[in-house]
Image (spheres, rainbow, N blue to C red):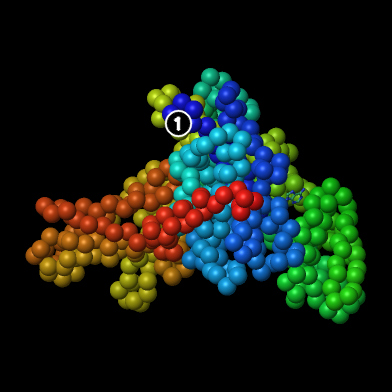
């Protein structure tokens, strides 16, 4: 296949649902349906003996065979293993995500023919380790991941496209300042962007990778379970099957509460059966602190961008959980603006990713780009050093958060003894001064330093953040004539041979045993 016919594909790999979009022959983003005819695929995997089932059927199995089902793997990205043992096996979270991505791949190929190049989205607040895990998931699913792009940036691009801010239409003089409030199933992001003509510049970003619709579901489950206990003196949450069923009913009731003042949740356990009525007011009361957390983050991000509410033109809402009236009311109240819901909450992110994929394919064909993106890093990057007095491990920040990327920072280390042949540098991401409260990105071993270097010789280490938030490390030793080897070992990252093994297995699954 020549690059002329390569489709531009973008994927929103969501905590609860994933969406695949492509650009049509006029360059407009459109969502592709899956084999079941749905525009979004539940990011849920059922491991049923030799059969791997992804999507709606796997979601249904959560109520009947919860021990065989993996959902929400995105929340565990960056961890060594998924939090739940499935059929006695521990899977890395990116492997579970790869099964989801492969289902999207197989279903799309059956409609548009073979392709492999894609852009996948990540929460802006994902750290380096989680970004790498997402790229690895794409690789294991048989894709060539051209780029990863931040979800709010993707949403802003989709918004800009619909508003006609492209190469031909965007007025270079007019600047729109937009806050993107993205509350999905499992993650929350706030990003402040400036759109000038076809330039998308991120000014600041913040968020919480452990906050999303899932937490609202949990509160509703608790409300219903407590009411059930008052009636029948037993707790449906203690049994995995009853709990799985209750969870699905509550997620459904949560959606009802977005349009109606009350919902009734059926709950059956130990031969007792009840319908428990929950009002929107009760639900809002039980989740007020969650909304408040997002409000706090909005204010912080605006401050970090150096702006006031009056400087903002719009607050764009994306992510399925922004359909909850309590979110809209809070945004209206804090910003003094009517929230903008003009982009499709569930599809905008995938559409923006497809536009980004189109841009990269155009670039490869030598065409001028239709738009430009400038990002910031969402976490400070530092190296670990020992405090000489307290002997505590300190985070020496090299690149503070919200620095425009790409960016390069250097740090000069000194050898401690004569003829030292290697230096170990530990790289962390996070805001805390204590290294132990930060995420370890990896360890960089600088080997084969020249022989007979005197003690105190400088070793210069360069950290380079790419525009997509991925890190590269380079080393320079002045006056060294031999090749310096640098090995960057990533924390919790699968080794290449495992990635290749999983790629052969996952992307080789036939549609017959891969529904
Ligand atoms: P996303 O990851 O953006 O697809 O968002 C999925 C989340 O949005 C899930 O937690 C859903 O329960 C939630 N969601 C979708 N539609 C609604 C709705 N109408 N009201 C409340 N939450 C919703």
- Horizontal side of 307 relative to 409 (left or right) equals right
Q: Is residue 206 visible?
A: no
Residue 432 or residue 8, whichever sits in front: 8
Name the quarter where the N terminus is drawn: top left
Q: Is residue 140 visible?
A: yes
Instruction: Confirm or reject: label 1 Cβ below 8 Å from ligand 1.
Output: no
- Residue at 83% across / 67% down in the picture? 224
Image coordinates for residue 443, horizontal then vertical, percent:
34, 63
Residue at the spot 10% in from the left edge and 63% down from the top edge: 451
Q: Nearer the viewer, residue 22 or 406?
A: 22
Q: Residue furthest top?
A: 168
- Among the 4 quarters of the image, the one containing residue 396: bottom left
Q: Which residue sits at x=17%, y=66%?
A: 421
Q: How far across and down, in percent of the image, does residue 357 sit?
A: 50, 35
For the residue pair 51 and 434, the one nearer the viewer reads as: 51
> In the rendering, at what x and y percent does residue 270 appear?
85, 76
Disc 1 target residue: 1
- Looking at the image, the residue that sits furthest to the front is 512
The structure residue drawn at horizontal position 90% and vertical position 70%, both measured from the top left corner, is 273
Label 1 Cα neighbours within 10 Å, binned few <14 / some 14-19 / many ≥20: few
């Amino acid at each position: 296949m020549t690059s002329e016919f390569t489709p531009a594909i973008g994927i929103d790999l969501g905590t609860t649902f994933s969406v695949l979009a492509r650009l049509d022959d006029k360059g407009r983003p459109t969502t592709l349906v899956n084999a079941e005819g749905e525009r979004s695929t539940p990011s849920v995997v059922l491991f049923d003996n030799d059969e791997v089932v992804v999507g709606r059927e796997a979601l249904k199995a959560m109520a009947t065979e919860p021990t065989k089902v993996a959902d929400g793997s995105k929340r565990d990205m960056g961890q060594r293993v998924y939090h739940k043992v499935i059929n006695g096996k521990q899977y890395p979270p990116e492997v579970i995500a790869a099964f989801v991505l492969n289902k999207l791949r197989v279903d799309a190929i059956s409609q548009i023919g073979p392709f492999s190049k894609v852009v996948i989205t990540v929460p802006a607040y994902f750290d380096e380790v989680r970004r790498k895990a997402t790229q690895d998931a794409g690789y294991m699913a048989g894709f060539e991941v051209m780029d990863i792009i931040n979800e709010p940036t993707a949403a802003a691009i989709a918004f800009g496209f619909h508003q006609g801010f492209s190469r031909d239409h965007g007025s270079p003089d007019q600047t729109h300042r937009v806050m993107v409030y993205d509350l999905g199933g499992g993650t929350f992001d706030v990003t402040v962007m400036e759109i000038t003509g076809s330039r998308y510049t991120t000014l600041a970003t913040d968020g919480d990778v452990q906050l999303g619709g899932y937490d609202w579901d949990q509160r509703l489950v608790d409300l219903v379970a407590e009411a059930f206990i008052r009636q029948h003196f037993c707790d449906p949450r203690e049994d995995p099957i009853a709990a799985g069923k209750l969870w699905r009913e509550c997620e459904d009731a949560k959606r009802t509460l977005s349009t109606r003042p009350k919902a009734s949740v059926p709950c059956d356990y130990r031969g007792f059966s009840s319908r428990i009525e929950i009002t929107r007011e009760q639900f809002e009361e039980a989740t007020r602190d969650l909304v408040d957390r997002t409000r706090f983050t909005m204010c912080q991000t605006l401050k970090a961008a150096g702006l006031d509410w009056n400087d903002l033109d719009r607050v764009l809402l994306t992510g399925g959980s922004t359909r909850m009236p309590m979110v809209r009311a809070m945004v209206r109240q804090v910003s003094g603006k009517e929230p903008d819901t003009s982009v499709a909450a569930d599809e905008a992110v995938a559409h923006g990713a497809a536009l980004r994929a189109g841009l990269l394919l155009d670039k490869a064909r030598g065409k001028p780009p239709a738009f430009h993106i400038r990002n910031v890093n969402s976490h400070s990057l530092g190296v670990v050093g020992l405090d000489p007095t307290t002997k505590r491990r300190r985070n020496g920040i090299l690149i503070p958060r919200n620095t425009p990327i790409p960016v390069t920072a250097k740090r000069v280390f000194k050898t401690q003894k004569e003829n030292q042949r290697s230096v170990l540098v530990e790289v962390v991401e996070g805001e805390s001064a204590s290294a132990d409260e930060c995420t370890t990105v990896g360890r960089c071993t600088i080997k084969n330093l020249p022989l007979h270097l005197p003690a105190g010789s400088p070793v210069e280490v360069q950290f380079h953040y790419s525009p997509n938030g991925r890190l590269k490390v380079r080393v320079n030793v002045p006056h060294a004539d031999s090749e310096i080897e640098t090995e960057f070992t990533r924390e919790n990252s699968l080794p290449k041979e495992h990635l290749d093994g999983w790629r052969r297995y996952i992307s080789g699954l036939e549609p017959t045993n891969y529904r």
